[in-house]
């Protein structure tokens, strides 16, 4: 879905496909009709954007086969779908029964992460629409915070230099620009935008920047305006925005029974109290602690549907973040992805009952994001 900012810039809005379990190219193509094409029809959109997740198996297939990349591009084009951004955070098995901290491996101190990300960049240049200004890839915030030592820091610095060189060489070879966006997340080496300015202080901003996930921003209790200003002062470009909302509860004691419905074994749900006075790596730990609130929980919830009271969603931070990032006289970022990957682990009463219900829910999320952008003065436009 494309919108035009008042400054004339085209803003791409996509949905993140890491909600789907397919990890090979055949599975990815099969899911296009099941979800994306159906959503495009429901939204009445001329073109629908995908924030495409390619796990290592699919990335290896595509990176080694130019004909297969062309086929995937044709499959997208014939359905009115476009890809300007890839989700390069999960590496493999994102829909295993238990993911938790496995999602942070390999980290940026391991050579496999660099190889995978450069493969994604090579794939993306063949998927980009001809008129797209650039491509983007979101990636993990270097790694989980423990253990993290001087040897890892040195290896990361060398990997980031090699990443910049690889992206620069790709632009020379293809004429297309791809940038990589590091995504702050609670519990990681880069948890917030302040840590991003420290750990990414020596990167080349032509190729490397930040992905602002608005749920993560909320869980870090960051003010969106201050966060955007901090990144600007540091010279770190905002390459990508993930339009997402986290859980919030003012009184975790009163909300404990309702919160307990969100405890599940697959994903990490880092929990932070106001000002990050209390920090927990998962929701069950927070509930056992009895810590006072308010809390924000790293649990991406559907944008358009309020959780059961006394819980709420951080959509206020989401809207303030969009205002700071896209609502000004000049858009700070033109790649936006709605990334609610948790539909399958929502409390049972809230889970979609099949592909049609999931497609309808994700289309409603995109409509929410589109309407929020229109409230900021952006206009939808015909793309083809």
Image: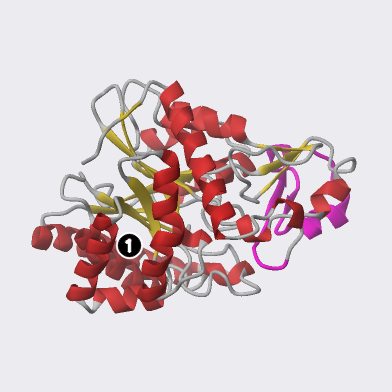
Question: Which colouring convention does the figure follow?
Answer: secondary structure
Give the percent coordinates (x, y) of residue 362: 52, 48
Point out residue 112 in the picture as x, y percentages from the top left corner. 38, 76
Q: Is residue 51 above or below residue 192?
A: below
| Residue holding disc 1 | 160
Q: Is residue 214 left or right of residue 169?
A: right
Q: Which residue occupies the foreground of this view, 234 or 332?
A: 332
* The N terminus, quarter of image: top left
Q: Position of residue 58 (x, y in %)?
A: 36, 74
**In the image, which residues are magenta?**
265-293
The picture quadrant where one finds residue 91 is bottom left
Give residue 152's position: percent from left, percent from top.
Answer: 46, 70
Q: Secondary structure at mark 1?
A: helix
| Image-based side of 221 in relation to 44, left or right | right
Residue 267, quarter of picture: bottom right
Residue 255 horizontal side relative to residue 356, left or right: right
Residue 267 on the magenta span? yes
Snapshot quadrant of residue 175: bottom left
Q: Nearer the viewer, residue 213 or 71?
A: 71
């Amino acid at each position: 879905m494309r919108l035009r900012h008042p400054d004339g810039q085209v803003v791409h809005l996509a949905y993140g496909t890491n909600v789907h379990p397919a990890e090979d190219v055949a599975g990815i193509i099969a899911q296009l009709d099941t979800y994306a094409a159906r959503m495009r029809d429901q939204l009445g959109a001329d073109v629908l954007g995908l924030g495409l997740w390619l796990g290592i198996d699919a990335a290896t297939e595509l990176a080694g086969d130019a004909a297969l990349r062309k086929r995937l591009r044709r499959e997208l084009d014939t359905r009115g779908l476009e890809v300007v951004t890839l989700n390069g955070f999960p590496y493999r098995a994102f829909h295993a029964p238990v993911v938790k901290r496995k999602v942070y491996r390999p980290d940026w101190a391991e050579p496999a992460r660099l190889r995978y990300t450069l493969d994604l960049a090579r794939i993306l240049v063949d998927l980009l629409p001809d008129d797209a200004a650039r491509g983007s890839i979101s990636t993990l915030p270097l790694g989980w915070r423990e253990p993290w030592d001087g040897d890892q820091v040195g290896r990361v610095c060398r990997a980031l230099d090699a990443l910049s060189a690889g992206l620069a060489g790709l632009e020379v070879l293809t004429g297309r620009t791809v940038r990589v966006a590091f995504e702050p997340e609670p519990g990681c080496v880069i948890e917030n935008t302040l840590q991003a300015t420290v750990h990414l202080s020596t990167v080349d901003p032509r190729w490397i920047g930040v992905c602002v996930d608005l749920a993560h921003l909320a869980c870090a209790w960051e003010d969106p305006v201050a966060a955007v200003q901090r990144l600007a002062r540091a010279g770190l470009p905002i390459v990508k925005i993930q339009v997402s909302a986290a859980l919030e509860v003012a009184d975790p004691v009163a909300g404990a029974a309702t919160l307990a419905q969100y405890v599940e074994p697959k994903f990490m749900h880092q929990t932070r109290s106001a000002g990050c006075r209390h920090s927990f790596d998962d929701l069950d730990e927070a509930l056992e602690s009895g810590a006072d609130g308010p809390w924000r929980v790293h649990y991406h919830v559907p944008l358009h549907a309020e959780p059961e009271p006394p819980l709420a969603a951080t959509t206020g931070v989401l809207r303030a973040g969009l205002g700071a990032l896209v609502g000004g006289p000049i858009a700070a970022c033109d790649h936006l992805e709605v990334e609610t990957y948790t539909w399958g682990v929502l409390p049972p009463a809230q889970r979609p009952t099949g592909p049609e219900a999931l497609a309808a829910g994700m289309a409603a999320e995109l409509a929410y994001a589109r309407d929020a952008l229109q409230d900021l003065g952006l206009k939808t436009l015909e793309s083809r």
